[in-house]
Image (spheres, rainbow, N blue to C red):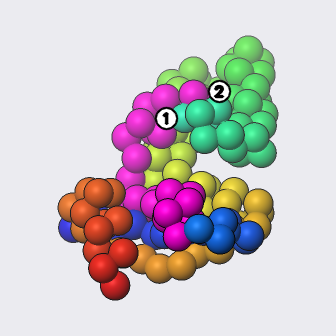
Amino acid sequence: MPTFTVHERANPPADRIDRAESLVFIKDGFSWVAALFAPFWLLVHRLWWPLLGYVVLSGVFELVRQGNSLDPRWISLAGAGLHLLIGFEADTVRRWALYRRGWHMLASVTAMNIAEGARRFFEA
């Protein structure tokens, strides 16, 4: 069963409803969307520093490919490895970005989906 972490802004709204609506639930586990569409996933989640790292690494891979110093299959394998790494660490990168913006983690919830996780969080 998936686990979700619940995050809240540093200065949450005073109203209970607004405060509940501003919470962010992040699923813990592998993200296929992040692995398959890494740069777009990073853009959608506004993860600028990881996106910059991705672009730099992709540029280095392309320079090595152009230099003919390695077999292109190894460079393709390294690119696939980078995408797998992003897929495995997508939730950690999102948590790190929220932490840098002043958010803090309230709790973790185990549930089948986000809706059930939110229900369990608010019941507790």
Which region of the structure is painted magenta?
Answer: 16-40
- The residue that label 1 is drawn on is 80
Q: Position of residue 57 (x, y in %)?
A: 72, 36
Residue 117, which numbered label?
Answer: none
Report the quarter where the C terminus lies: bottom left
**Can the viewer see residue 42?**
yes
- Dot 1 amino acid type: Ala
Q: Quadrant of residue 106?
A: bottom right
Q: Residue at x 74, y 70 (%)?
A: 11
Which quarter of the image is occupied by the N terminus? Answer: bottom left
Which residue is located at x 47 percent, y 79 percent?
Answer: 107
Q: Which residue is mark 2?
A: 70
Measured as percent of width and height from the top left, residue 39 is found at 60, 30
| Residue 22 belongs to magenta span | yes
User: Pointer 1: residues within 10 angstroms few (<14), some, or many (20+)?
Assistant: some
Distance CA(mark 1)–CA(mark 2): 16 Å
28 relative to 121, above or below: above
Report if the CB atoms under discs 1 and 2 are less than 8 Å apart.
no
Answer yes or no: is residue 77 visible: no
37 w.r.t. 99: above or below: above
- Secondary structure under tag 1 reads helix
Looking at this view, is 10 or 26 the one in front?
10
Could you tell me residue 116's position as x and y percent?
Answer: 25, 63
Q: Residue furthest front?
A: 15
- The mark total stands at 2
Q: What's under tag 2, amino acid-wise?
A: Leu
Q: Secondary structure at mark 2?
A: loop
Residue depicted at x 36% and y 75%: 122
